[in-house]
Image: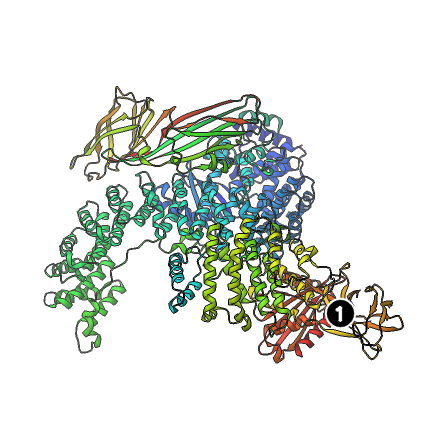
Amino acid sequence: MIHSLFLINCSGDIFLEKHWKSVVSQSVCDYFFEAQEKAIDVENVPPVISTPHHYLISIYRDKIFFVSVIQTEVPPLFVIEFLHRVADTFQDYFGECSETAIKDNVVIVYELLEEMLDNGFPLATESNILKELIKPPTILRSVVNSITGSSNVGDTLPTGQLSNIPWRRAGVKYTNNEAYFDVVEEIDAIIDKSGSTVFAEIQGLHVASSNRSDLMRFHLPLCHYLQNPRLLDDVSFHPCIRFKRWESERVLSFIPPDGNFRLISYRVSSQNLVAIPVYVKHMISFKENSSSGRFDVTIGPKQNMGKTVEGVVMTVHMPKAVLNMNLTATQGSYTFDPVTKVLTWDVGKITPQKLPNLKGIVNLQSGAPKPEENPSLNIQFKIQQLAISGLKVNRLDMYGEKYKPFKGVKYITKAGKFQVRT
Amino acid sequence: MAASPAYGEEKGGSSSLGEPEYGHDPASGGIFSSDYKRHDDLKEMLDSNKDSLKLEAMKRIVAMIARGKNASDLFPAVVKNVACKNIEVKKLVYVYLVRYAEEQQDLALLSISTFQRGLKDPNQLIRASALRVLSSIRVPIIVPIMMLAIKEAASDMSPYVRKTAAHAIPKLYSLDSDQKDQLIEVIEKLLADKTTLVAGSVVMAFEEVCPERIDLIHKNYRKLCNLLIDVEEWGQVVIINMLTRYARTQFLSPNQNESLLEESTEKAFYGSEEEDTKDTKAEAASLAKRKPYVMDPDHRLLLRNTKPLLQSRNAAVVMAVAQLYFHLAPKAEVGVIAKALVRLLRSHSEVQYVVLQNVATMSIKRRGMFEPYLKSFYIRSTDPTQIKILKLEVLTNLANETNISTILREFQTYIRSMDKDFVAATIQAIGRCATNIGKVRDTCLNGLVQLLSNRDELVVAESVVVIKKLLQMQPAQHSEIIKHMAKLTDNIQVPMARASILWLIGEYCEHVPKIAPDVLRKMAKSFTNEEDIVKLQVINLAAKLYLTNSKQSKLLTQYILNLAKYDQNYDIRDRARFIRQLIVPTEKSGALNKYAKKLFLAQKPAPILESSFKDRDHFQLGSLSHLLNAKAVGYQELPDWPDEAPDPSVRNVEVPEWTKCTSREKRKEKVEKPFYSDSEGESGPTESADSEPESVSEESSSSSSSGSSSSGSEEEEEEEEEEGSGEQSEDKEEEQKRSKRKEKEGSRKAGSPSEEEEEEEGAKKEKKAVAPQGRKGHAETSSEEASASESSSSGSDSGSEAEAKRKKAPPSSRAGPKEISLLDLDDFTPPPPQPVPSSSIISSSLVTDLEGLTLTDTSLAPALLSPAFGAVRTYELLHRMAGEGLSVEYCFSRRPFLGDPHMLAIQIQISNNTDAEVKSLRVSEPKLLSGMRIQEFPEIEHLAPGDTASVVMGIDFCDSTQAANFQLCTHTRHFYVSIQPPVGELMAPVFMSENEFKKEQEHLARLGEGKLTGMSEITEKLTLTEKCQSDHAIVQQVTSAANVGRVPCGADNEYRFAAKTVTSGSLVLITLERREGTAAQLTVNSEKMVIGTMLVKDIVQALAQ
């Protein structure tokens, strides 16, 4: 399946290569560079490239291209999903998935890749198993290692691979048993020029974090304000959840994996139910035959259920013709990058009494035709202690436990792909 | 000693960086490749005794490998450390070894013994990792070692080791594809594994090594379906993709007669009202032909078990299930995948890209599926262009009369985008919407015309091209637009657009008679500066104008043609020459001249704007080939649905599982019994051998009990199939309804002999006559039966069995033991209280049948049955004269002798032709060769005059044809007699699949190679006599000559038989291959050369007779 993997940075250096079958020459990446050149933008490099003898399937993550070489038919998503899993693993191990982190830990990276694939077919991709095989580097350990000469490779052989619940390590011990559940809901929306909602839906996510010494079954009955079970449109589960119980009782029953994991994700797509917590008043115009334009944006809260909207950030990709912007913000600060033409306005918290406003003049390239389209505004925000869909975790039952471990549920609503067309 | 300062230095260097970060060290790579001294350091470090030093060295070496630097010259130094105790060093050495073993094959061999030792380790993880590394070393010399290791690991206790073995299979296969057959054996074995850990990996191996061997899956199909949900995610993808292909070959299309279904039920309804009219007969006939589709329960099982996986977090799994549903599910059920696919659109852009490609293909076929999610495909300005274009494609595919206004409004936003490629694509999309939906054509056209005044040239150009296509559909009404476009030629520079405008003016020059010549004039002026594509269109325009309006344009045309004559591009020169000849009349110009106008101004069909994703679904969705729209290496075609469903019984699993066979099979059997018993009652005394009907009924009961459909004749086959499909439904009500309908159907059929023409020609005539009645009878009973069995608990297999038995016309003496046999194969030889030849035949055919479950080729069924008839030859043991009135005959009953499997059962028939009673008839003083044994029959105390007694005795001939001599004693006399078995009787049939047969044959052939060729294989050419031309005759001749079982065979002209010798159990394989005419070739493979030779002789004789 996956023949080889090349990691390429933005400037086109191949800084790591790994082969699971016979060695494939680096020159195969030339096809990739060719495609990259053609694509202009990094985002537009086609994920699948066909070359005379190989197929290249690539992903772009954190300014690194993961280019895999394939020789025979394989579902492309299989490879893409795997490459993302590799990137996730690096992230998990090194805290970031960057070129320096990978170069700094090249031996661990190599060992990881060796374990993750066997002959190009995924072998161990579960982070718990990998961590048992190869310990992630920590500062303490690196100091200890340099003194004692011991290594990052676990001397115990991994047993997780043999267990039927591969997402849990065997025999972990914690001093305090705790389980946290974060209910994260993201609002995806497209808002029309006139302020009406073209499209909106909620993407929900339960991220759980548990430190548990023992295998214990959890029950998590989800309840809805609206008492409408059909509201949760499309649910996907972590493999630890017993699907049958969900089907019959709408209860999530599971033995939690160790550490952070995504328990379920769901979607609420009926548009009427999606409350949009902010509104945007905008006035962006470019004058014909003059090298300037006006820019005036105000953001205000709407239906926020008594919670404050925080962490508001607006990013705007201005047209190419824009040279510079001269703006004043009543709140927060703004930056404009004249190279990428991206305007970022970090607003912060919105207080309904004094609405934040950003106003000023746009300088255009002289002589260039007036941009036809107004840029669309991408907005980020978050609201603490609120699940916008109205979903609530009723209670959390734990079975197989005598004492009471600590448990908690946290709600947060965020903007996902929230876009305002102007 | 030299090592320590070097080490210190290294240490210092590394500690300054904090961690051993050699890959990070910018100097390291460059220096290593050039500076040999450094390499010496590494070698010294590797040679040292300290593990820490070795580790340092290995880390640096791995860092080199990671950067793609050559470290192969360190090979000997590294390999030495393969047995190092330190686990990290060991691991890194493995990494190194796997990377360079291919280049340094000889040295790599040094490490093999370490792994071989590891393979024997008591720890399963060590065994697994040893196998993993061993199989990753690509050195052809060790192929046999690898093969051995894989074989051993495949039967390891630990599932993890077995999984590793499965992983090793494709590695070995890529190293040496000659091992394929052996590897298939291993795969077959591992496929039968019941653990989830192994399933994914072995299917992966199956896909890489032998994806064509779909027959290996049959037995494991249900198990795989049931395990699927617990298999790890990567394995799920592979299994689902494989099962999609499998299902395409084994089940019927769920959508084939959707429309017919409604139609046919309606007809049945009318049919019941006017039973007698001829009309209805015809209708009934057509109804029978299109029997309503009922999904195979296995097909349903697959769909049901994969559905929950749509919720998987792994996009590849979701996509795999989605494609499975798209390719396999009934139309009504495909919808469920849309939601899951839309969910994937939230994922990484690469995932979006692939998913959208597939959605685009699906949305052409099943538009309704994605319509509710239309808005999820709306485009954000931040999407990458390639995603935007794909979303646009999907939106266009989804457009219909109801949602077109929303979509067009959305498109309007897109047209103002900054991303010009995207705008161009949007314009194309609008064009497509306009052609597909007539209602909005004018609106679209107007919108596009407005775009012609856009400032961006690309937008204008694209609009021109699209407008051109739209106008071609109804040019007459749009001369205004054409005029407008003519004006654009002054400004627009994009060649494609200019060419389009020129073509448009030329084509419709009659609509714009005033403008056209003027445009031509302008173009003539700028001709030399135009692009080639524009030049060609200028020539075209000139030609067209010349033909329609030669007065105004004659000179211009001449001018342009002259310019073109000296153009640099030869295409243009060619075109000019050609057109001049065609349009300008000269003496030389031929007949074509007259038709020039017709040629140029013919009505041209409007171009069809269609999606580039049309017809992409002939590739399996989700595959690389689909994405590239080209066949990728190693792509397995998705087969079309079969017209006739292959035998579903092949998926039934062996003996132990019988008791819990699916409800469907039970029902089938219930239904069938009465049918055959009825037919038996009526057709019993017919011309054919008396035993036939009985054996047929016997057979059918046995076959149905195992869910097989390998029954006696084609007719039954069909009947059974109908039953199968009819009774499958789990819904009770429906079933009853159905059986009622069938009753009607049956009676109608009975009334219409023409009906029978549908049946296969091969069926025997008297059976044909019987069948309708039988069917009728069966239908009646079946409805009773169905209701009766419904009330009884579903688990009571034997209960319904007994019930069925009761219905049998003459309750046969074998009913008792038979019941047991259904549950347990071992017990299945009934004790012979009074064995009659026919019964023994039946039991052997029963064996045939039970074994025949594996058959895919159902047409073989009659052949399997037939050997029974006339196969029994009687021999004389004691002639009436010699025996003074006592005559004794014997025959080989061909059934296992009770109590001793090594003995041949010999049936002896003693007739007392004297006037006096014969007393105490017994066997005594056997004179046997060593090893031979005899089991006398119990003494017969009295045999009245004229009476006949039949007894069975057993003789173990030790696989030799030496006679067994013994005395037959009466109270007065002793007769010396001897029984000499024909070689063909020394064996008992064994039943194997074609594959097993081939495998065994090869195995035997290989044995022969070791010694002398010809030892285990005897080949003889022969000529078939007139008599032995038909399949039936040949099979009968062979089976009468030897007690062998037929093996199914794919080829028409080949017959295969297999048997085992009774005593030693060695295999005898017979292959008869028909050549042209009457020639044939007989091959016998056997370890026992003598038996083989004699058998060949006997069979040749039998066939030549």
Task: Name the foreground residue: B251 vs B175.
Answer: B251
Residue B101 visible from this viewpoint: no
Is the residue B695 above or below the residue B319 in the image?
A: below
Total marks drawn?
A: 1
Task: Name the foreground residue: B5 vs B213.
Answer: B213
Q: Residue at x 62, y 50 (%)?
A: B659
Residue topped by disc 1: B1090
Percent coordinates x, y for residue A73 in the rendering: 48, 52
Q: Which residue is drawn at 30% across and 26% down?
A: A303
Task: Name the foreground residue: A3 vs B1029.
Answer: B1029
* A268 displayed left or right of B549: right
- Residue B577 appears in which quarter of the rendering? bottom left
Q: Is mark 1 on a helix, strand or loop?
A: helix
* A157 displayed left or right of B757: right
Percent coordinates x, y for residue B1061 in the rendering: 73, 64
Is the residue A69 above or below the residue B514 in the image?
A: above
Percent coordinates x, y for residue B331 in the rendering: 40, 51
* Quadrant of the drawing holding the C terminus of chain B: bottom right
The subunit carrying tag 1 is B
The amino acid type found where label 1 is placed reads: Val
